[in-house]
């Protein structure tokens, strides 16, 4: 953004209204410019220099949709929010289809507009950051990192599936990056200039999920004071990512199936069908076939979603990508924690991270590196900086060659303890954690070899 205060261009046919909105936004930390005619608005849009556009649908000499198109053509990253009278809601919905971030019906609270502006600007900043990181790290696809054979196969499958409008079902353990793959599918598709809309089916209460997905009309239920477009309509011509699809209630599965089969939906409380063009990407860590057998998931919906299935490998199956993943996440975490001294992971610590099974997958790695960035007091994270549970679970199985000699138990204990201590770089605390013994027992087992360097 330009400077510390985001610059907002406000256009309304009523200049007093434009000024009121602009002045209100000033009190919320924005720098605003008010305009009331189309010619000056077009000049300002073409000149750029603003971070967001707020426009009324009715502008003398033009209209809000024309200004939206002009803005999208010249500066597609600049979010646009439309102001409209209640009687123009249908046109406002059309503006969403053409790329507007949101619309507000008059009268509205300035605080509400400020909230949506902040969200829009934050999302635009994240998209810019993702592109910058992708360029810096040479990633093949948006947000996806890896050179292993399994990741290259994933990249190839994503590229081949991206431009199809067929539904995609993403499968994989929690934390493998299903959301990133969904974004990559959108970014590589012909829909990339349109919206990518996300909904977590497990995070929204069942009573609200239907309205959230399909929208509602005024008076449909208590609190429905105005018509509202659902996420399907907001994602029109773009992509809708249905995360945790396995948790969707059965009655909503039927409505989703109807949209997939007909391309139409009906808002809650409405008798009118609405046409939508949405690419569906769904994700789950559940066994959907088992859910079908238990009666929790519709078999016909599974067939409709499972047109293109993409299995995302767990981190333990492409552990060779660990160095690049660490580089990627360290760059992100240093940006969030500019006072952090952490630059690298020491070789002994990297060995332990590579031996760990990563039940939480890439997400667990990201969180661990965030922890290290906050807590480490040096440029290099050493073995003793790693969490004890990671070090203990990463201990490799014993592989001792006994030959033909039968060794006394004491000698076995000494050799094994010495090997384990060396495996953990001389860190006694980590070694004790892995062996399940205390430091006194470790010293006893080591005997004459207990002079190995301490630490931990």
Image: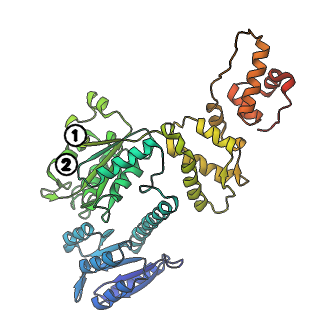
Residue that mark 2 sits on: 260
What residue appears at the point 34 percent right and 33 percent down from the top-left corner? Answer: 287
In percent of width and height, residue 364 lies at 54, 43
Horizontal side, residue 50 vs residue 207: left or right: right
Of labels 1 and 2, earlier in sequence is: 2
Determine which of the numbered discs, if any, sits on residue 371 in the image.
none
The answer to whether residue 186 is left or right of residue 405 is left
Q: 117 or 389: nearer the eye?
A: 389
Give the residue number, with chain letter if any, for mark 1.
301
Classify 78 as above or below 154: below
Q: Which residue is found at the position 58% from the left and 48% from the top?
A: 323
Residue 428 in view in this figure:
yes
Helix, strand or loop for disc 2 = helix
Which picture quadrant has residue 84? bottom left
Q: Position of residue 31 (x, y in %)?
A: 47, 82
- Label 1, label 2: how far apart the Cα atoms are: 9 Å
Quadrant of image for the C terminus: top right
Density class for disc 2 (Cα within 10 Å; few <14, some 14-19, many ≥20) is many
């Amino acid at each position: 953004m330009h400077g510390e205060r985001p610059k907002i261009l406000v256009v309304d046919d009523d200049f007093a209204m434009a000024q009121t909105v602009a002045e209100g936004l000033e009190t919320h930390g924005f720098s605003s410019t008010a305009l009331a005619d189309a010619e000056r608005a077009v000049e300002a849009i073409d000149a750029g220099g603003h971070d967001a556009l707020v426009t009324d649908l009715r502008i003398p000499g033009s209209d809000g949709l024309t200004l939206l198109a002009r803005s999208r053509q010249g500066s597609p990253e600049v979010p646009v929010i439309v102001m409209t009278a209640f009687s123009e809601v249908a046109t406002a919905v059309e503006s969403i289809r053409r790329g507007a971030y949101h619309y507000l019906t008059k009268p509205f609270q300035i605080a509400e507009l400020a909230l949506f502006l902040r969200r829009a600007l934050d999302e635009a900043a994240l998209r810019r950051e993702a592109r910058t990181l992708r360029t810096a790290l040479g990633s093949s696809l948006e947000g996806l990192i890896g050179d292993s054979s399994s990741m290259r196969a994933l990249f190839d499958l994503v590229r081949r599936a991206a431009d199809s409008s067929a539904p995609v079902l993403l499968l994989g353990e929690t934390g493998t990056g299903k959301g990133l793959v969904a974004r990559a599918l959108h970014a590589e598709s012909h829909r990339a200039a349109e919206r990518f809309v996300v909904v977590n089916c497990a995070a929204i209460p069942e009573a609200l999920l239907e309205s959230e997905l399909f929208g509602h009309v005024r008076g449909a239920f208590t609190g429905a004071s105005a018509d509202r477009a659902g996420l399907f309509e907001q994602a029109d011509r773009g992509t809708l990512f249905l995360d945790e699809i396995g948790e969707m209630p059965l009655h909503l599965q039927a409505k989703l199936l109807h949209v997939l089969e007909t391309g139409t939906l009906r808002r809650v409380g409405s008798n009118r069908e609405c046409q939508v063009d949405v690419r569906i990407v769904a994700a789950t860590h559940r066994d959907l076939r088992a859910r079908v057998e238990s009666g929790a998931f519709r078999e016909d919906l599974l067939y409709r979603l499972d047109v293109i299935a993409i299995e995302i490998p767990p981190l333990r199956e492409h552990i060779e990508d660990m160095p690049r993943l660490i580089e990627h996440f360290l760059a992100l975490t240093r940006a969030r924690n500019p006072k952090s001294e952490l630059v690298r992971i020491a070789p002994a610590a990297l060995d332990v991270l590579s031996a760990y099974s990563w039940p939480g997958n890439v997400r667990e790695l990201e969180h661990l590196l965030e922890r290290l960035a906050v807590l480490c007091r040096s440029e290099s994270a050493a073995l003793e900086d790693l969490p004890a549970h990671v070090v203990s679970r990463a201990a490799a199985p014993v592989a001792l060659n006994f030959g033909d000699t039968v060794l006394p138990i004491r000698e076995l204990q000494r050799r094994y303890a010495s090997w384990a201590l060396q495996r953990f770089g001389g860190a006694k605390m980590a070694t004790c954690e892995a062996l399940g013994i205390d430091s006194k027992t470790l010293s006893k087992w080591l005997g004459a070899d207990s002079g190995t360097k301490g630490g931990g």
